[in-house]
Structures are given as C-alpha cells and as structure tokens.
Image (cartoon, rainbow, N blue to C red):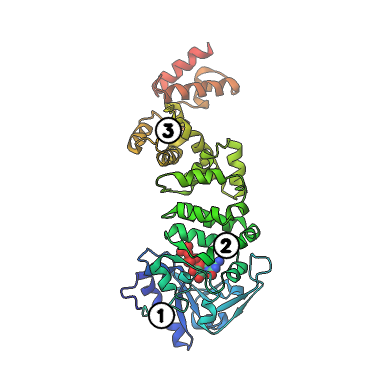
Amino acid sequence: MIIKNLPVEFEEAKEVLGAIQQAGFEAYFVGGSVRDTILGLKIHDVDIATSAYPSEVKKIFKKTVDTGIEHGTVTVLDHGRAYEITTFRTESTYQDFRRPDHVEFVRSLRDDLKRRDLTINALAMKPNGEIIDLFDGLDDLKRGRIRAVGVAEERFHEDALRMMRAVRFASQLDFIIEENTLNAIQHHAPLLAKVAVERIHVEWVKLLLGRNPQAGLTDFLATDLYLYCPLFDDKEAVFRKILQLKTLQIRNEESAWTLLCYLSSLSSSSVKKLLRAWKSSNGLIDNVIVATRLVPMIKQQRLDTWTYYKSGLLCLKIANDVATILGFGINQAILEKKYAALPIKNKHELKVNGGILIRSLKIKPGPQLGEILRKLEFKVVVGEIENQQEVLLAAAAEWVK
Ligand SMILES: Nc1ccn([C@@H]2O[C@H](COP(=O)(O)OP(=O)(O)OP(=O)(O)O)[C@@H](O)[C@H]2O)c(=O)n1
Ligand SMILES: [Mg+2]
C-alpha cells in the first residue's frame, strides 16, 4: 500500500528522513500518525524511527536536543519544527511494570515494530508513503480490530498501560478488541494498579471523549480494568447506568467527570477526593464540583439568576452538557443569552468597592463593610437595584444608619 497525498506534516518531515537516509541509515514514520493517516483522521505529531543510534543522529543534524536519550529519543530542530527521532529498540522485561529496565538499541525495523503494543500501531511508512505492514495491522485497521502484536500477554506484561490503551482505542476509533487480546487484558488487569495514575488518567479521558465511549467502557468493565483504577471499585453500577444511555458524546474532560460524579451522587468533598486520587488539577476539580451541583438544579428547573452569576458560564455549559446527555438539558443558546443578560459578571464590575464605601460612608473596614458589599452585589445581580454609583451609595447609606 502506498499513501498518495501525504498530510503536510509528513511532507515537511521528509527532509529530515532524507538526511538520515543520506547518512546511510534507515528512517521511517511510525506510530499513531501512520495509523491515523490511513484512517483518514487528522494527525497531531509525526514520530520517526531510525536504525541510527542517538549519537549517530546527533552527528547528522546541526540542532538537536537530548529529550529522551536514555530511551533512544533525540529531538531534531529543523526549519522551526521539532521532530522526535527514536532509535529502533527492544524493551526487555519491565520489572516494575512502569518503565523498561533497559532499552536495547537494534538495527532492524522488525525488531522495533514487534515490541509495539497493537498491530494498528505497528505500521511503518517510508518517506514516499509506502506502508510496511509486518503484523497485519492494515487488515486490522480495515476490519476495525484492536489486536496486540504477537503474544498479547507479553505485550501487557511489558507495559500494563497498554491494556488501557486498548480500551481507549476501542472507544476512540470505535473498534472491537479481538478475543485473545481481550482475554489477555482480563487476565493481566491487576497489573494496572502498578501504573502511574497520570498515565492511566490520559487514557481514561481519551476513552470517555472517544467516538464510541460505551464500547470502550464495556470492555473496561468486562475486563475488570476499572477495579485497578483509583476509587473506581464501587463504580460498577454507575458505569452500567452510563452504558444504558441512548447516545453518549462527551465534549470535554470536565463534562466527563461531572457526568460520573452526578450519577454517583457524590458530595463536593467526595468529588474532590475522587479527582485528587486521579491527580487532576485544582482548576478542573473546582469546575467539576460546581458543575456537579448545577446538574440537579437544571433538572428541577431551579436555576436562578444568582446561581447563574455564581457558577460562571463555563460551569453552566459543562453542567448543561451533562444534563443534555441525560435528556433534561436546556437550549444552550438560551443559557448563554441568560448569562449574557446578567447586570454584572463578577464583583469587580460593581460600581463601588470597599475603598469608595469607606470614604463616602465614613465606615471602617471590617465585617460590616463586607456585608454591605455582598448585599449590594446580590441586589445588583438579581436586578433589585441598578449598578450605578449614586444608587449603590444611597442604598448602602440606608443600611448603615
Ligand atoms: N505503551 C505504549 C505506548 C506507545 N507504544 C508505541 O509508540 C507509538 C507512539 O505512542 P503514543 O504517541 O503514546 O501513542 P499513539 O499510538 O501515537 O496514539 P496518539 O494518537 O494518542 O498519540 C504507538 O503507536 C505504539 O507503536 C507502545 O508500543 N506502547
Ligand atoms: Mg502519538
């Protein structure tokens, strides 16, 4: 198979491969970019594999950075672009199931490809677009099948994250995991507990945001992988609820977590605990907490102006995405319009502040001042008084009398 009309990312990188070949070595495009190009999907980065050792790669190019030299990766800077070039390698036994004990550089493409996780990820492409398919990855791509390269058990033993990658691709590409591979995942699922949470997190989110998350989730459940993810051991019933939803298209990570937290009826502190265990950022945690509280308000049509104001548009949209998935969302244009109609969006837009009140009303900083500001903020937001300095000062003057 030869791919004609390669995406521009490959065209730009051709020169780099050419330079390696000129120096007498082999160089190929490998990994996800080759897979996604054959599938007609957009690619994000091109990975290059070569028979040249890192020291040899560094001699070929003027500007290189040792980004992962112990694993054989050198980054080449060319025309303002960066290319990761990795020496063909075999990773022998990962004793801690996290990281290879040692990487062995090899000169043969076959040896490199056979240590890769899935056949659809073990394709290589020459600069002219010719596909090298040593493990029937093309057939699996055509049939929509996820299959480990060689003996599945060995692949998962080398890196337990690959089991999560398999279920992630089932969702992302809407593919089916081949039986042998699925059995091997089930068999090795407990190894996932040894993998760094951050790595599992990446795959979990890609699974939820995929084309067919219910397919990935079905495998995630059936293989027991979920039991070895942080704080998921009591979530089977919730995952089953998600599987029963008619359609499931999740827009972003916040919505994914909010859906899960809402269906689990988690309190704010439990949301925090769960997301902390998954090593999520504080920003994400805060948004999911707010959005999770909003979902039932949307359901019961209890969204008032003050809630709109306090929640912010981002969290409102997240919650409404989830409500829409669950069948009780409101029209997004209406939601945005109502938000836009708020007299102010945050308290800094109030036409008075602490300093102005102190000077005009001759009061001292303290709890009373805070109380007045809060009351003004509320009354402006709900439209009881206008956001004009004289109006606000007059109202405040009444309260301090
Ligand atoms: N645990 C892993 C991770 C990666 N790979 C190999 O390294 C390639 C690049 O890895 P990565 O960029 O992490 O994944 P992609 O398959 O490219 O998927 P994505 O589109 O998400 O980047 C994969 O295609 C696969 O051949 C592997 O064998 N085992
Ligand atoms: Mg990739």
The CA distance from mark 1 to mark 2 is 32 Å
The CA distance from mark 1 to mark 3 is 55 Å
Q: Is residue 83 visible?
A: no
Residue drawn at (50%, 69%) of the image: 118
First in sequence: mark 1 vs mark 2? 1
Find disc 3 in the rendering and name its residue: 345
Q: Quick check: 117 left or right of 33?
A: right
Q: Quick check: 90 left or right of 248?
A: right
Circle 1 — which element? Answer: loop
Task: Tell me, yes or no, whether the two marked residues, 1 and 2, touch with CB atoms within 8 Å.
Answer: no
Residue drawn at (56%, 69%) of the image: 152
Find disc 2 in the rendering and name its residue: 185
Residue 2, image quadrant: bottom left
Circle 3 — which element? Answer: loop
Residue drawn at (64%, 58%) of the image: 190
First in sequence: mark 3 vs mark 2? 2
